[in-house]
Image (spheres, rainbow, N blue to C red):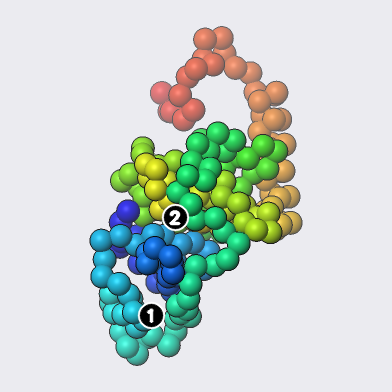
Amino acid sequence: MKFNKLAAICKSQKRVHIYNDPESGAQWLGDACSMYLLEGMPRIACTDEILRLFDVPESNRYDYFCKHEDLPSGIDFANETGVSGKDLKEESATIGWLGKSYRLFKDGAELYYINEIYLAPFAEDYNYVKFHRREMKGGGFLLGINVGLELQALICPSFLHRQETFVETIGEISKALFYMQGNFIILTGTEDAPVEQTLE
């Protein structure tokens, strides 16, 4: 996991949450919508230390919302939980909305949207990452990320389906695609041609 990518997440959101595991002594860092296991780092005693690591000037530190507490209750942090991810499917499509890009994860009939910035810390390890649904006590969805057998991150989805404008726009796009598919003639032998049109 790339620490500089994690730092970029916290700085972009201006939120820093440090979580202590009272049982193992491990620490997690995130922005309240995500949390990542910290490994190979000195123990962080206070939020000021992490802001210094992020190179945030003292004059700007009051702009950040910071918390330092124990792991949230109601989430199972066991490494073995849901490692197979057999019911979770990462879709090949991504969706862009209001300047942000989202990866799609299908869980049965449900579809979840994960802001790509939260996957950036694992860009170099993506082939070794295992995604799975991590249950919350209240039944909510979290995207669990394991590298090998160890849980490395937990990410909350974005609730784009609650934004009426987004849902209406996606519906209009789908209708237009089906219309074009049914009304634009496909020349024989071009079904597997590249998607991009050329001037030739």
Q: Position of residue 113 (x, y in %)?
A: 58, 50
Give the residue at x 43% y 28%: 198
195, above or below 67, in the image: above
- Can you tell which quarter of the image residue 47 is in? bottom left
Judging by the rendered image, the residue that carries numbered circle 1 is 47
Report the label total.
2
Q: Position of residue 174 (x, y in %)?
A: 68, 38
Label 1 residue SS: helix
Give the residue at x 32% y 53%: 1
Hey, what amino acid is under mark 2? Ala
- Can you tell which quarter of the image residue 25 is in? bottom left
Judging by the rendered image, the residue that carries numbered circle 2 is 153
Instruction: Tell me which label, 2 or 1, sits earlier in the chain.
Output: 1
- Can you tell which quarter of the image residue 7 is in? bottom left
Answer left or right for 188 relative to 51: right
On the question of residue 126 being in view, the answer is: no
Badge 2 vs badge 1, beta-carbon distance below 8 Å:
no
Q: Residues within 10 Å of mark 1 (few under 14, many from 20)?
A: some
